[in-house]
Image (cartoon, grey):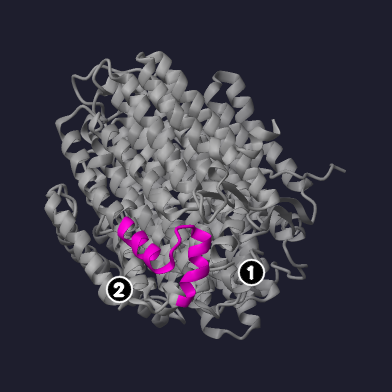
Amino acid sequence: MIEAVHFPPALILFAGAFLLPFLHGTPRHVVALAAPLLTLWAVWGVPDGVALSVPFLEYQLQVVEGDRLSRLFATIFSIMAFTGTLFSLRQGSRLELPAAFVYAGGAVGVTFAGDLISMFIFWELMAVASTAVIWANGGQTAYRASMRYILMHLFGGVVLMAGILGVVAQTGSIEFGAMRTDSLATWLILIGFLVNAGAPPFSAWLPDAYPEASWSGTVFLSAFTTKTAVYVLLRGFPGAEVLIPIGSYMIFYGIIYALLENDMRRILSYSIINQVGFMVVGIGIGTELTLNGAAAHAFTHIIYKALLLMSAGSVLLMSGGVRRCTDLGGLFKTMPYTATMGIIGALAISSFPFTSGFISKSMIAQGAADQHMFWVWMGLAAASAGVFLHAGIKYPWYVFFQKDSGLRLKEPPLSMKLSMGLFAFLCIGLGLNPEPLYAILPYPVDYVPYTTGHVVTMLQLLLFSGLAFFIMLPYMKRTLTITLDFDWLYRKLFKLAARDAADRTAAAHTAAFEDADKRLAQLINRIFRAHGPHGILARTWPTGSMVLWAAALLALSLVVYY
Amino acid sequence: MNTLLAHLPALQVVVPMVAAPLCLLAGRAGLAWIIAFLAAAFATVAAALLAYQTLHHGPISYAMGGWAPPWGIEYAVDTANAFILLLVAAIACVVLVFCRTSIPKEIRAGREHLFYCMYTLCLTGLLGIAITGDAFNVFVFLEISSLSSYALIAMGGRRKSLTAAFQYLIMGTIGATFFLIGVGLLYMMTGTLNMADLSARIPELQDSRPVLAAFAFITVGLALKAALFPLHLWLPNAYAYAPSGVSAFMAATATKVSLYVLLRFTFTIFGSEFAFGNLPLLWVLLVPAVLAMFAGSFSAIFQTDIKRMLAYSSVAQIGYITLAIALANPAGVQAAMIHIFNHGLMKAALFCAMGCIFYRIGSTRIDQMAGLGRQMPWTFAAIVTGGLSLLGVPLTAGYISKWYLVQAALQTDLWWLVILIALSSMLALVYVWRLVEALYFQEPVPGREAVREAPLSMLLPTLLLAGANIYFGLDTRLPVAMTENAALLLFQGPGG
């Protein structure tokens, strides 16, 4: 029995971040690996209920308030911080790991925040720290991507803050609990959350920014921001129906863009949006089963997505920066270990039976079926096939098999192999024995994943889409696009959704962005003319006209008052 | 000891006033600085004691020279002006430490003692405005502080400093004259200059033309002194071309004291009923305030001189304060008072940091500052902290300001104001980021030698002010308790 923890577990990670810049060599490694483990220990020491409360203005901030949901997310965040650290021990940048610690600490902080203000503080801390993770890669591309990234998040932050202020003004309480989407203020909060989840129309920041981080930075990025958003949605808006269409859109947006994409880490980034879409749908359905499913899926997704990105990161590091699928291929021969890890991750993300993805995603689908939400269920099933296509087959096929690209890469160093091995073990371990995960979910679980029905449906789905992939392979190579007119049962739905989403996003986005760019330039020009150093509003005025202003204002007020 | 305490309100002003000629007589920079510093330190302690007394034992009335009010001049201290006194004196004290090293480099040699003389005189004026309970006395101290600040700005040493000072002189004089005309009209109608008396007698005369005219003259005069848009035109040059220490001191205190007088006159003397009920002061203040928030921020974005940029940012921030005043509810008054305090902290920190940079590279132009953040990490840290506070990021003082401002706006159902506040905060992000980007991410100017961190005697006050931005973002007991009480007192209005 450990003693109750009455301080924010995030502090351990912050302290680690503070120490790291002063350390080198082995002590640095020890501190870097110990901090996330200590955090994990502290996470499990947080008792239920308010553990730390701090006065602020006329309120009490509940900086640490534990329950099952908080602990579940904090647990996976700590595990992720540990594995990510292990993976990135060879990283040359000395900024990245401290930034990642603050980032992870922010995520752990959000999960234990019992009130809106402390949640917001940790939330913004994450935004800034994750930007620093991208910076750490160095170079102009990373810098510009990070700027676009932070602007989007600060915008989300402002919207969120406005919503929080509104809620406080209405209710007089800063408690962070389940809210209803019945006022402008709660809508603003929901929008603020969704920006971080990568929901439309704010999805583009994610695949734009994540691949610009270093080979290890992306691994951290993939885990915290979107999953924290899932956490706050679970806490704040369980059963908000608007989340079902939003999540469905995300699912297909992710699939289609991932299928069209050529950069291996960008494929995986799109697939984050897709996977978060599943969770958002689960939250929107809002039964105990789907909420459990969403939470469990966040847990397993962090593991297999990090595993996939670690395998991609290994390829990136060992190849010295080759990113495009068309330049890769045939790496299986010289990197069998990395390839195996990538395949395990790919199977898990496709929710292959006996992997962690299967035991979590099927809960959401089952929940939709139980609610007789036929179209939602259908969409989820179709999407599962799509996931298998883009992440399950496309990623490993193009990177590790396909043609021989001539690259003869060595396996990555031991620490990276170990971290991948750990997560691969968890992927399969949780797939074979989901009980430890089910035991810590927010609601009691009486769901059995391995029924004949579930397994057979899933296998059918996967086999057929796998078949489709290889039949269509020639087309994919040439045009890097794919049409799915072969599919069974639900092909129409998928096609429609695909075409709709593709049209709306690809063409419209480009056009809209160009247009917006032009307009923005015009607007800035106009503002500059008025406000620039020689503009009418900012130049040095002759004293006479200043006096005139004063006289005019006086005259005006006299007139107004009379 | 008790006699000393009893005469504290008088000493608060008299000590700096006496110190000013002493600085002049001292004739040497070192000695003059010590005298000025002792006076400012005394003023800070006195203000702290007064603040404590008013908070725990209620308002203090002090009859100057033993002449009972309303015949004599009354010094009336309550939480509202004790709070302002504390801000002014404390900032003056900290900035004075900063000036010791920075001033010899920024003004003509041999004039340091004159500088300290003017500085203490300016301090005297500002403290006097805040403490006095007599309307005419406000004018006297307003002139003392203004005249000395013209001289302080002119000491900036650049040719533009002289024009800036001259323009400020013209505008300041007009502002003060308007104020005096207004006070004169009130005296004509009521036969008294004592603020408490005025507030008791004005309600009977509410509809008389001279009182209305007096109100117009006073508000416009004070708006001019407070640099409310579009009467802010004197401010950017005045702040940009003054010596760094003066910019820091004035940006943090001078306009704030005028805003305090505006609060005092609108709410206590005329009463919110009169100003906002009968007269459309809401719109008279709200429209310029919103314009200031945007015009000031946009102008700040495009400035190449960072001191000028900060000056325009002050215009925008004064917009927030005026906006809070215009809301005309106790929450708004409290928000205004809190932002007066917090904005003083941010701008003092930022101008001091600019002083540190000027000390090393002799310029505050943004293109000259490229890459300095790595060479002067502590100054950079102060700039980032001040900038975050300016944006209103949680855990900084600026966040507390924004919090109260938005809450006050929501209380009046003017929810669109919240959107405007958020938008203009995003503009602040642009100009703050521009500075951070230049300092940290750009490559240093080729050919410029690497510089060292600013000397400790400048760095410590800068960091202290920056730290205060964090401290008052976390521990809000002092400003919240003071302003809560102050807002109630101010809002009680005539006869209250």
Q: Residue at x 69, y 67 (%)?
A: A449
Name the magenta segment's main secondary structure: helix
Q: Is residue A318 magenta?
A: no
Q: Which residues are magenta?
A: B180-204
Q: Nearer the viewer, mark 1 or mark 2?
A: 1
Residue type, numbered disc 1: Gly
User: Badge 1 sits on which subunit?
Assistant: A
Query: Residue placed farthest to the right in the image?
Result: A1
Front residue of B422/A149: it is B422
The correct choice, above or below, for A40 with respect to A278 in the image is: above
Residue type, numbered disc 2: Arg
Asked if residue B321 lies left or right of residue A482, the reply is right
Q: Is residue B477 visible?
A: yes
Q: Is residue A418 visible?
A: no
Tell me how far mark 1 sits from mark 2, CA to CA: 42 Å
Which element type, helix, strand or loop, lies under badge 2? helix
Label at residue A172 = 1
Asked if residue A422 lies left or right of residue B96, the reply is right
Is the residue at mark 1 from the same chain as the one at mark 2? yes
Location of residue A272 in the rendering, given as x and y in whole percent from the top left corner: 47, 58
Q: Is residue B182 magenta?
A: yes
Residue position for label 2: A504
**Which quadrant is the C terminus of chain A positioned in?**
bottom left
Which element type, helix, strand or loop, lies under badge 1? loop
- Of callouts 1 and 2, the N-terminal one: 1
The correct choice, above or below, for B432 with respect to B370 in the image is: below
Location of residue B127 in the rendering, given as x and y in whole percent from the top left corner: 46, 41
Tag 2: Cα neighbours inside 10 Å, few (<14), some, or many (≥20)?
A: few
Front residue of A10/B295: it is B295
